[in-house]
Amino acid sequence: MEQDQVSSNSNLPVNLKSRLQSSYDATAPIYNKWTAQHSHLRLRYVDRLLQFLPEASQLPPQTDEDASTVESQSNDSPFFRSLSGKLVALELGCGSGHPVTAKLLSTNLFAKITANDLSPVQIQLGQKASDLGSDKRVGWVVGDMMALSFPDDSLDVVVGLYSLIHLPREEQLVMMQKIGKWLRPGGLVLVNFSREDEESQVMEQWLGQEEGWMFWSGFGAEKMLGFLIEKVQELEVLVGEVTREEGGADAEFLWVIGRKK
Ligand SMILES: C[S@@+](CC[C@H](N)C(=O)[O-])C[C@H]1O[C@@H](n2cnc3c(N)ncnc32)[C@H](O)[C@@H]1O
C-alpha cells in the first residue's frame, strides 16, 4: 500500500529547530495569550486521558520523596484517591505550562512531571508562573524533545499537544516509538497531529508576527493513524479522531490517546 511507506525527504527548511526556537522565544507572550482562548479542547482531552488511567495496583510503590510533594487531594472518587501522587508524567512541547502542565498538577495524581520545551523563553515563563514555578513536582527541561531519553517502562503519562506537529513527520513517528518504549504497560499518551498530509508547511509571519517564522509537518490523519497502528507496536490506539478547533481557530487536528500494551 503506497500510504504505508514512510519516505525520508530533503525538502525541509535548513536550521529548522533553531529557527523554531527563535520564533517561539520571540513570540511566546503573543502565542500564549492567543492560545488561552482555545484551552477548552485541550483540557477536555486531558480529562478523557485521565479516565483511562491504570489501576493503582499496577503502579510501582510510591517513594517517600514523592509522597512528601503531594499536599492535597482534589478529586473525590476512590479510584483517583488511590492513584494520588503516584504517577510520573512527561509533557513534550509544554510551552509556558498553561494550560496542560497546570491542569496535570491540579489533579494531584502526579509525583513528578517533566515539562520539556525547545524554547528557553517559554520554560522561563513557566518557571515564573505563580501556580507552577515553585512546584517541586515539575522538572523543566529545555531542548529538542528528540534528544530526551528515559528508561523503558518508566512513565505513566505522556502528553504532547500542538508540539509534535513541529517535528518533521518522520521524526513524529520516531517520537511515538520512543514514547511506546518509555511508557509503563498500561501507561497513556495523548498527542495531536496535523490533519493535512504535508511534509513541510511554512509560514513567514505566524500570528501576524514579524519574527513568527513557523514550520509544521504531518502525514495527514488517515495515514498517521495507520502508521501508529502498524509501526508503533507497543501502543494500542484507544482514541483516534479528527476534531475541529474551538474559539474561532479555523483548523482540525487528529487527536490520539494511546495505551502501552
Ligand atoms: C503551539 S505550541 C504548544 C504549546 C503547548 N503544548 C500548548 O498546548 O499550548 C508548540 C510548542 O512546542 C515547542 N516545540 C517545538 N518544537 C519542539 C521540539 N522539537 N522539542 C520540544 N518542544 C518543541 C515550541 O517551543 C512551543 O512552545
Image (cartoon, rainbow, N blue to C red):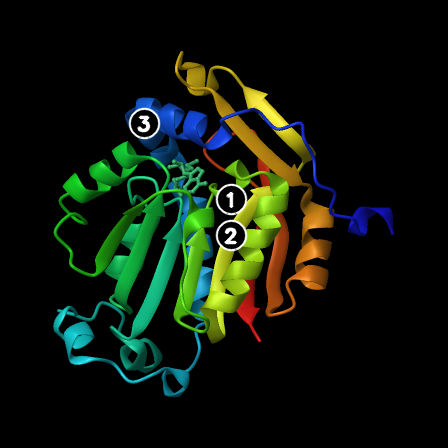
Asked which quadrant contains residue 193, the reply is: top right
Mark 3 and mark 2: Cα distance apart in space: 23 Å
> Which of 56/5 is in front?
5
Give how far across and how far down residue 33 sits, in percent: 31, 29
Query: Which residue is identified by label 1?
Result: 164
- Mark earlier in primary sequence (3, 2): 3
Residue sitting at x 61%, y 51% = 173
Residue sitting at x 53%, y 28% = 215
Query: Which residue is identified by label 3?
Result: 25
Q: Is residue 245 visible to us here?
A: no
Check if mark 1's residue and mark 2's residue have beta carbons within 8 Å: yes
Q: Which mark is residue 191?
A: 2
Give how far across and how far down residue 98 sits, in percent: 30, 43
Give how far across and how far down residue 72 sits, in percent: 15, 69
Q: Is residue 18 visible to us here?
A: yes
| Residue type pointed to by label 1 | Leu
- Mark earlier in primary sequence (1, 2): 1
